[in-house]
Image (tube, rainbow, N blue to C red):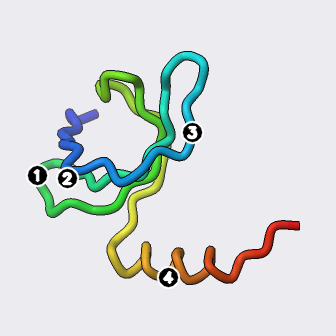
Amino acid sequence: MADLEFKVVETLGVLSESKKGWRKELNLVSWNGAAPKYDLRTWSPEHDQMGKGITLSKEELQELSKILADFKAE
């Protein structure tokens, strides 16, 4: 498997933090030198390890925002 390069360009928000310090974050991340995209996943305290997550374009994030604005928790 090829090495994965990433750079957290900006941390936009933290959704939660585990007892071990891992945080679920919404970040702007550049993957393998590409233009940054919005990324939601868990990160270790040093940002040197990550969990599974999703990467979204600006348009996808805007659509998700619309869905969440209409969301009603039961």
| Residue named by callout 2 | 30
Name the element at disc 2: strand
Tag 3 and tag 4, C-beta contact below 8 Å? no
3 or 4: tag closer to the N-terminus: 3
2 or 3: tag closer to the N-terminus: 3
Name the element at disc 1: loop
Amino acid, disc 1: Gly
| Residue named by callout 4 | 63
**What's the residue at 33%, 75% (across, down)?**
58
1 or 4: tag closer to the N-terminus: 1
Residue lying farthest to the right in this orientation: 74
The C terminus sits in image quarter: bottom right
Amino acid, disc 3: Ser
Label 4: how many residues lie within 10 Å, few (<14), some (14-19) or many (20+)? few
Alpha carbon separation for disc pair 1 and 4:
25 Å
Give the left or right position of residue 34, taking residue 48 as reference.
left
Q: Position of residue 9 (x, y in %)?
A: 19, 49
2 or 4: tag closer to the N-terminus: 2
| Residue named by callout 3 | 16
**What's the residue at 49%, 21% (across, down)?**
21
Label 2: how many residues lie within 10 Å, few (<14), some (14-19) or many (20+)? some
> Residue 62: which quarter of the image?
bottom left
> Residue 48: which quarter of the image?
top left
Residue 74 against residue 25 in the figure, above or below: below
Tag 2 and tag 1, C-beta contact below 8 Å? yes
Alpha carbon separation for disc pair 2 and 3:
22 Å
Q: Position of residue 6 (x, y in %)?
A: 21, 42
Q: Disc 1 vs disc 3: which is toward the camera? A: 3
Residue lying farthest to the left in this orientation: 33
Alpha carbon separation for disc pair 1 and 3:
28 Å
Amino acid, disc 2: Ser
| Residue named by callout 1 | 33
